[in-house]
Image (spheres, grey):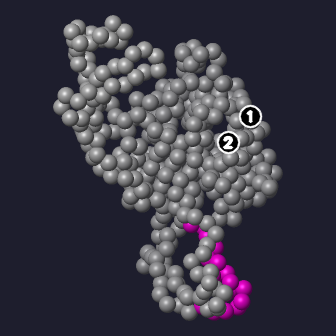
Amino acid sequence: MINQIIHGDCFDVLKNIPDSSIDLILTDPPYGLSFMGKNWDHGVPGVQFWIEALRVAKPGAHLFAFGGTRTFHRLAVAIEDAGWEIRDTIMWVYGSGFPKSLDVSKAIDKMAGAEREVVDSKEVSDMRGGNFKTSNGRILVNITVPATEAAKQWQGWGTALKPAFEPITVARKPLTGTVAENVLEHGTGALNVDGCRVPLNGEVLTMTRPAANPNTDTKAPQTNRSDKPFEYRNDQGRWTANLIHDGSEEVVGLFPETKSGKMKEGQIRTSKPLFGSKTDHIAETYGDSGSAARFFYCAKASKSERSEGNTHPTVKPLALMKYLITLGLPPGGTVLDPFCGSGTTALACKELGRNYICIEKELEYYQIACNRLDQPIEPIPDEPIEEIIDNSPLQLKLF
C-alpha cells in the first residue's frame, strides 16, 4: 500500500490502514460547491470520515486540508468535532482565480427575450488561469451592451467575487504527554520551521547588544548582561508564515513596497520582556526592500506542471504541495492523501523521496494520477462510475 495510488472509496480504504500509522494527512477534499457540475463535489466530508482519519494518524500528526471559502466552516467544524485540534489556518493566495458570477444585466435581457448588440470581443481565461483553446490557440467572447432599460440599470452587477485564496485547515491529533515526549516517542507533533523558512536574497539579519558598562548600567545584574558584546546573526531566512502566495503579478501587486533599513549608528532600541528587566540592544534588520510579498513563501506553478491529458479542474501547484509536505512530515514518515485527484501529492512525495498512500475514487482522475507517476492502472471496475459515486458515504449534501 505504501507509495501507491489506490483506486477506491477512501472511507473504505482507510479501514485497511492500521491505527496510528500515518505521520501527515495532506489533502484537497470536495468543497461542496458542485464545482463545474461535478457529482464528486456536492458534499463536504463529515465528522465520521475525519474520525477514521484521526484513527490512522499517529498522536501529534498534522492534518492540512484545503477548503473552499464558502464551505470552509463546515470542513473545520467537522474536523474539530472528530477530535482534531485546530492549530491554525494557512491562506493560499493566487492570482489565477476565475469569477463564477452571473451577469445580472444579461440575465434581465434574457428573461425579457431581448437580443443584445455585440460591440467588441475579448479573450477569456478558464478556471485554471490558462486560455481556452481554439484552432489558433485562443478563444474570444462577445462584449455586448444592454438591450432593455431594466438591463441598463443593472449593468455591471454580478453575483460573485473573483476567488483569490483558499484556506487550509491546520489541525493536529492530540498529543500523548508533552510535545517533547510525543516527538521522541512518535516523531510527530511539531512543524519543520527551519526547513520551510522563506529564502533571503543574500541579506543577513544581525542583532548586537553592547557590553555592560559597570559605571552606568545599573540593571546589569538583573539582565545578566555580560561584559562582552553579544551578536546574533540570522541567515536562515524569514520565519515560516501562515500565508503562501503564487508570485503572480496580481498577488504581488496587493502587497505594499517596504524598506527594511538599518537603524542609525549608535541608536539603542529597548525591549521589555514579559518577565524581568528591560534589555538594550542595537538591531540591524535585513536591509532589503521591495514588495512585502517577500516575507512569505512563493509557491509558483510551472506552466509544464499540468501534463498532457490532465483534465482535473483543481490541480494544486507542485511547489505548494512539496512545501506543505516538508513543513509537516518528519523524516521517514508517510503522507496520506485520501482525495488525491490527479496525484500531485504523490508526485511531490516522489520528488522529495518521501513515502505516501494516495486514494482516488474517480476513475478518470485515478488514471491521470497513475500516468503522471508512471504507475500501473488497476482494472476498470464492473459497476458504472455513476453508481460508485451515488453509493459513496462521503457525499454529504449541504443544506
Camera sees residue 39: yes
Which sits in the foreground, 256 or 329?
Answer: 256
Query: Quarter of the image containing the C terminus?
Result: bottom right
Q: Could you tell me the amino acid type at mark 2?
A: Ala
The residue stretch that appears in magenta = 99-116
Find disc 1 in the rendering and name its residue: 82
**Residue 279 locus on image (x, y percent):** 34, 19
Task: Please name the residue that numbered disc 2 is placed on.
Answer: 76
Query: Is residue 158 depicted above or below 256 in this figure?
Result: below
The quadrant in which the N terminus is found is: top right
SS category of the residue bearing label 2: helix
Q: Can you name the residue that lies furthest to the left here?
A: 265
Name the residue type under label 1: Ala
Pointer 1 or 2: first along the chain:
2
In this picture, is 4 found above or below 128? Answer: above
Label 1 element class: loop
Q: Quadrant of residue 375?
A: top right
The image position of residue 43, as x and y in percent, is 74, 53
Residue 362 at x, y percent in the picture: 67, 53
Closer to the camera: disc 1 or disc 2?
Answer: 2
Q: Position of residue 136 (x, y in %)?
A: 43, 79
